[in-house]
Structures are given as C-alpha cells and as structure tokens.
Amino acid sequence: MILGICNDADVLSVVKLVKLVITIIRISVPIILIVSCMIELFHAVIKAEVSESLKTVTRKIVAAIIIFLIPTGVDIIFRVLDYEKVYYPCIENSTKEGISAARQVKAESLILLAKNTLLEDYYFLARDEINKMTDTKKQASLTKELNSVHTEIEKAKKERDEREKNKYSKTGTYTRSELMDKDEQAVINMSNEEFIKYVAAMAQDIYHEYGGVLPSITIAQACLESGYGDHFEPTSHNLYGMIGYPSEKPLVTRTRKFENFYEATYYHYKYFEVYSDRYINFNRECKNGNPLLAVSDLSNYAGGEEAYPGKITKIINNYNLTQYDK
C-alpha cells in the first residue's frame, strides 16, 4: 500500500511542497540568525561589550548550524532505517520528473481500463492525468492513444443507445424509441384503453429501472390529470399536471414542459423522490406494493383536494391497473 502511495503523483506533489518548505526554513532561519549575530556584534563593538555578547552570538551560530544540518541528519537516519526502501521512494520520487513519470504510469493504467471497459469515466480521468504531465513528448503519445480509445468509446456508446431505443418496454407493446417519439396528436386520438397501455409501458419501464411510484398510480394520475390524453397544455407533453420543476421549489404559475411523454413520466417519478418529506406514507406504501394505501396520501398533489385520492382509486379499480405493478 505504501509503495502505491509513493507512486501517486498527487502524494508526490505534496511531498515536493513539504520539501520546498523545509528547504526554505533550512536556508532562511540560519541566515536570519547569522544576520542577527552580525548586528549584535556590531552593537557590542560600538558599546565595547564584545565579551558579553560572544556567548549569545556563539549560541545563535550553533543554532544556525544545527538547523541547517537537521534535514541532512534526518535524511541519513531515514535512509539507514528504511533499508527496504518502503517509505523513502516518496522522497526520492518527489521531483518534477518523478511526478510526471507517476502521472504517466497512472494515465497508462487508466487508458487500459478505458480500452477494456469502454467507459467514458476512465477516459476523462486519463485525460486529466495526461494534461498534468510535463514530458511533452510522452504527453503527445498518450494523447494520441487516448483519442483512439475515445473513438471506440463513442462507437460503443452509440451502439448502446441504439439498442436501448430499440428495446421493447416491459409490456412488450412499444420500443423505447416509440415511447419517446409518440407525438401529441397520436395520444389525443387514442381510446382510453390505448392510452392506458401507452402510459403503462412508460410507467413500467421507469418503475423497473428506478423503483418508486407504482405503475398503477402513475397510469391513474395520467388518466385523471390529462383526461385520458385529451386535455393537457399543447407542446408540454405534461400528462400529470405537474407545476414547476422537481429540482426546485414549485412554481405555481408555471406548468412544466417536457421534451416528450417519456421524460414527463420520468419526472413524475422524480417528483415523489424530490419531495419525499411531503409524501412519506405514499413512498412507504409504494415500496410495500400497496397502491390503494399509497393513494390515500395524494391529496397534497392536488393542492389539498380531499376527493383526489378517491378519484385515483376509482380509476385503478375500474381498469384493474394493479396488473401493471408486477
């Protein structure tokens, strides 16, 4: 573990800084003491009190010599005691070249990880290490290699995105791409049953990925808030009557707009996560798989309307929406 630390460029940078501070103290303190001695002797000569000042001057000179030699002595003792070179590499490698070499080793390791995993996180970490290197020739070589890996990462990312878009939802009715691309007019033209199946596909996808709100509740709220897809603000894709932004305090004068219905459904889930303190019972019963008990805590969603939970419960029961909670 120590050897690993001593090969860490950030650790070596700290050690280098400590060495610099020690060097400054090693040089400046003796100089200050010697200058002080000279001033004291000068005053002593003027006052004809040289003999009385010699002892003080001598002590200061001895102190200056000791302070100057302490780092050297410590270094010698450290080398003798650390004969297996467990700790001393931290000192030896804390040079400009040593730090750059450590960054090169780390960058090469991260490039290999990026190449093997095709994860962008490793690419960014490797890039940061390369940018901090001082050996421009090796820096250019590693940058070229990293750019090549990044091309492979981007290619893999596009392939993953394409597979994700073409993947069918949990209901098997729509692909992810179809869920996102559905336009508003198509939703308006749906029958109640078609609308329920469409929202169910999005709700199940999000529920199985993130947990949280049970699909039956998401579907029922979409039905009630949008009139089964007939009534929502144009170009908003807002099936859930959401106001404001989940990451901010509610803005009661502004209806939230989304890029598509899938995004709106995701933020419907996110809303109950962000405002978890307001929906403690709701979130607990969703986690326990009890949609009808969770619904009883929904009056806050409708601004305190007491009849709101009953309306949601009626829709869930009428269309047997709990079938989508599996």
Image (cartoon, rainbow, N blue to C red):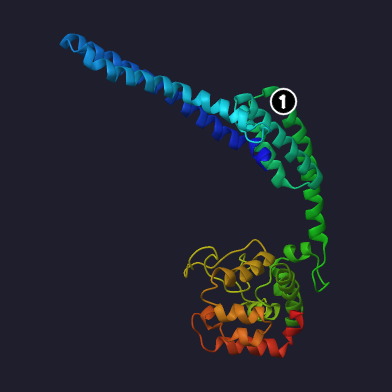
**In the picture, residue 125 is in which quadrant?**
top right
Left or right of 175? Residue 68 is left
Q: Quadrant of the C terminus?
A: bottom right
Mark 1: which secondary structure? Answer: helix
x and y percentages locating residue 67 in the rendered image: 42, 24
User: Where 322 falls versus 6 (above or below)?
Assistant: below
Q: Quadrant of residue 62?
A: top left
- Residue sticking out furthest to the left: 47
Q: Position of residue 313 (x, y in %)?
A: 64, 88
In the picture provided, is 323 more to the left or to the right than 303? Answer: right
Residue 187 location (% of width, % of height)? 71, 72
Q: Is residue 277 left or right of residue 315?
A: left
Q: Is residue 46 visible?
A: yes
Q: Which residue is mark 1?
A: 138
Tell me which amino acid carries mark 1: Lys
The answer to which of 127 and 275 lies nearer the viewer is 127
**Residue in the picture at 83% in, 72% down:** 172
In front here: 243 or 154? Answer: 154
Can residue 224 be seen at all in this image of the molecule?
A: no
**Residue at x 71% of width, y 90% of height:** 318
Q: Quadrant of residue 165?
A: bottom right
